[in-house]
Image (cartoon, rainbow, N blue to C red):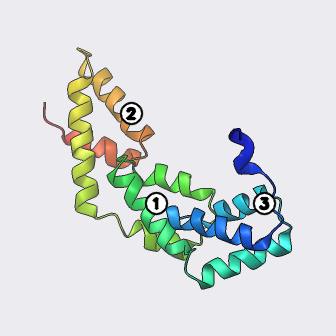
């Protein structure tokens, strides 16, 4: 079978239930992702809603757990800042309560330390004789990684060569 075999329509409820449980067990998922996946199976909205309720009741699907894992992963593995993580989470339609709990997973000291490490590394890698141009390039790079611009500029202002 070709690469489109994954997107084939499923009409059997038990088959859909089994596949979506495996999909959720593989890694944490948001309701938006699971809903999209169920619709890709060709299921009708009533069946999609029924399966979502089952997944939540069986604890296969938990938005708070998903958001916490997402924030931890993007920060620790990819070293993204809060703004970039927030933008990536936006499409998942999470409540403010869930977002607040998820962002609490980022330790302030660890965040500050990570920003310092990235700043120093990027500053060493940036080859420019003019200190203002060099700091500007570093700042733009850190801001593009999702770090807050005021925090970045405060760090750069205090940065010793």
Q: Position of residue 132 (x, y in %)?
A: 29, 24
Relative to 144, is 131 above or below? Answer: above
**Furthest-top residue in this view:** 129
To which residue does mark 3 refer?
A: 39
Rate crowding at label 3 as few (under 14), some (14 to 19) or many (20 or more) other CA atoms within 10 Å: some
The mark total stands at: 3
To which residue does mark 2 refer?
A: 141
Relative to 156, is 34 above or below? Answer: below
Q: Describe residue 93's horizontal placement relative to residue 64 as left or right.
A: right
Mark 2: secondary structure: helix
Mark 3: secondary structure: helix
Q: Nearer the viewer, mark 3 or mark 1?
A: 3
Q: Position of residue 84 (x, y in %)?
A: 48, 49
Determine the residue positioned at 35% across, 35% down: 139
Mark 1: secondary structure: helix
Determine the residue positioned at 46% across, 60% down: 70
Image quarter of residue 112: bottom left
Q: Nearer the viewer, mark 1 or mark 2?
A: 1
Mark sitting earlier along the chain (3/1): 3
Say which quadrant the N terminus sits in: top right
Query: Can residue 8 be seen in this snapshot?
Result: yes
Rate crowding at label 2 as few (under 14), some (14 to 19) or many (20 or more) other CA atoms within 10 Å: some
Say which quadrant the C terminus sits in: top left
Determine the residue positioned at 54% across, 52% down: 88
Q: Position of residue 10 (x, y in %)?
A: 80, 61
Are the residues tagged 1 and 2 within 8 Å (C-beta)?
A: no
**Furthest-left residue in this view:** 161
Relative to 24, is 157 above or below? Answer: above
In whole angstroms, how far apart are the C-alphas of marks 3 and 2? 38 Å
| Label at residue 70 | 1
């Amino acid at each position: 079978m070709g690469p489109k075999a994954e997107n084939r329509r499923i009409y059997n409820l038990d088959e859909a239930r089994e596949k979506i449980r495996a999909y959720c067990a593989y890694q944490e998922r948001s309701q938006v992702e699971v809903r999209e996946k169920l619709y890709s199976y060709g299921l009708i909205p009533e069946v999609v809603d029924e399966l979502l309720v089952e997944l939540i009741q069986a604890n296969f699907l938990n938005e708070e757990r998903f958001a916490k894992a997402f924030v931890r992963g993007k920060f620790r593995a990819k070293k993204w800042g809060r703004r970039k993580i927030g933008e990536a989470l936006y499409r998942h339609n999470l409540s403010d309560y869930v977002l607040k709990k998820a962002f609490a997973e980022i330790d302030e000291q660890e965040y500050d330390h990570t920003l310092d490490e990235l700043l120093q590394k990027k500053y060493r890698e940036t080859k420019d004789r003019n200190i203002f141009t060099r700091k500007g390039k570093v700042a733009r790079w850190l801001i593009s990684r999702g770090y807050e611009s005021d925090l970045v500029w405060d760090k750069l202002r205090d940065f010793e060569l």
